[in-house]
């Protein structure tokens, strides 16, 4: 059957927007990238989002395709039911009714989603968690956040705040988290926290201290201090993931975000540490994300397709 339908998908981050036209079968037929330039303020960013979405819809029509819906992923706190970008530290949104603004401008059904939740949706349905039904996607970068996806739907929570695994308490006497409380997982084991901890123990006051990736490299090369810092982070992550598994009993945990690029340097010791923590719980598969930085855009597309009741992606075949 020929199908000329596409959805317009945007993944809006603090520095850039990844945009695509995506077919109902999950195939991407065109991509664009645009700067967010958040320093211009939220009103200007919203203007760019609407311009870019409108431009993609026009491009689709010019190519003989039919845009049927729009999906937009944004960071921060997102009220998906009302389509409102409630709060975002790095884009500056405060109660922006982005869904309604997009509907008004483009005349197309629109879905608004949270960047990590839609990334998890894409990994669960099209990526590393495909075919396993129950997936916990954990993005480890500057912070740590998760999405629990069951049969292709990501839990949003009663207040739009499901998945904040980064704020599970893992070290009561640990460093203070950005949220204000000491000892959160994110304050101990995010990529940023690993870099900070290493600099602190090394007495490193350089302007550009070692990144988490460099700590992983130095640990692999046998540097004792890096090895200690890396292992501390692994143990804390295992504690957090074990809590996640106790709550959700998933088949697969997919690790994404910058830290997952450490590959087996992360996965191998983390699998062992998680295994040690399993008592009666079934051990999940622990795998690296497969979609890279396209996950958010693909997830936004899935959200748009779901919004108009079109679900014939690859995972159903
Ligand atoms: Zn916290």
Image: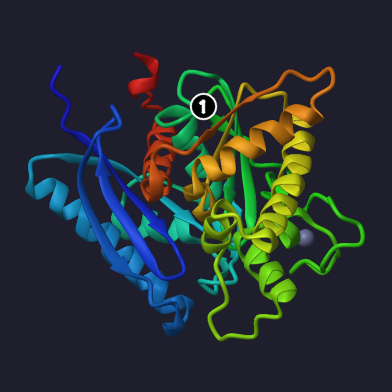
**How far across and down, in percent of the image, does residue 169 sit?**
84, 52
Q: Which residue is mark 1?
A: 152
**Which image quarter is the N terminus in?**
top left
Q: Report the residue at 31% width, 51% height from top.
A: 107
Quarter of the figure with residue 206: bottom right
Q: Nearer the viewer, residue 118 or 159?
A: 118
Q: Report the residue at 8% width, 40% height from top.
A: 64
**How far across and down, in percent of the image, does residue 21 sit?**
24, 45
Q: Is residue 76 above or below residue 237?
A: below
Element on which disc 1 rests: loop
Residue 152 in the figure: left or right of residue 35: right
Q: Report the residue at 55% width, 86% height from top.
A: 207
Q: Is residue 209 above or below residue 157?
A: below
Quarter of the figure with residue 3: top left
Quarter of the figure with residue 310: top left
Residue 15 in the figure: left or right of residue 237: left
**How far across and down, in percent of the image, does residue 7 sit?**
29, 41
């Amino acid at each position: 059957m020929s199908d000329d339908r596409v959805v317009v998908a945007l993944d809006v981050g603090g520095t850039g927007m990844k945009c695509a036209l995506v077919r109902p079968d999950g195939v991407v037929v065109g991509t664009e990238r645009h700067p967010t330039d958040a320093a211009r303020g939220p009103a200007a960013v919203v203007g760019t989002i609407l311009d870019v979405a409108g431009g993609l819809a026009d491009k689709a029509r010019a190519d003989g395709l039919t845009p049927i819906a729009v999906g937009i992923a944004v960071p921060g706190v997102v009220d998906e039911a009302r389509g409102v970008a409630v709060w975002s530290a790095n884009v500056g949104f405060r109660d922006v009714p982005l869904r309604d603004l997009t509907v008004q401008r483009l005349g197309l059904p629109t879905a608004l989603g949270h960047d990590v939740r839609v990334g998890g949706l894409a990994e669960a349905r099209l990526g590393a968690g495909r075919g396993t039904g129950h997936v916990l996607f954990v993005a480890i970068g500057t912070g740590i956040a998760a999405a629990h996806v069951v049969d292709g739907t990501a839990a949003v929570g009663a207040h739009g705040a499901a998945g904040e695994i980064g704020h599970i308490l893992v070290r009561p006497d640990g460093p203070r988290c950005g949220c204000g409380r000491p000892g959160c997982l994110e304050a101990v084991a995010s990529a940023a926290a690993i870099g900070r901890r290493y600099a602190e123990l090394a007495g490193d006051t350089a302007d550009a201290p070692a990144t988490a990736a460099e700590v992983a490299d130095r640990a692999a090369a046998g540097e004792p201090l890096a090895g200690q810092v890396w292992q501390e982070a692994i143990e804390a992550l295992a504690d957090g993931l074990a809590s996640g598994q106790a709550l959700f009993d998933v088949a697969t945990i997919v690790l994404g975000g910058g830290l997952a690029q450490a590959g087996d340097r992360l996965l191998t010791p983390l699998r062992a540490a998680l295994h040690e923590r399993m008592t009666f719980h079934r051990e999940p598969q622990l795998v690296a994300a497969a979609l890279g930085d396209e996950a958010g855009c693909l997830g936004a597309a899935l959200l748009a397709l779901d919004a108009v009741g079109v679900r014939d992606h690859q995972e159903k075949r």
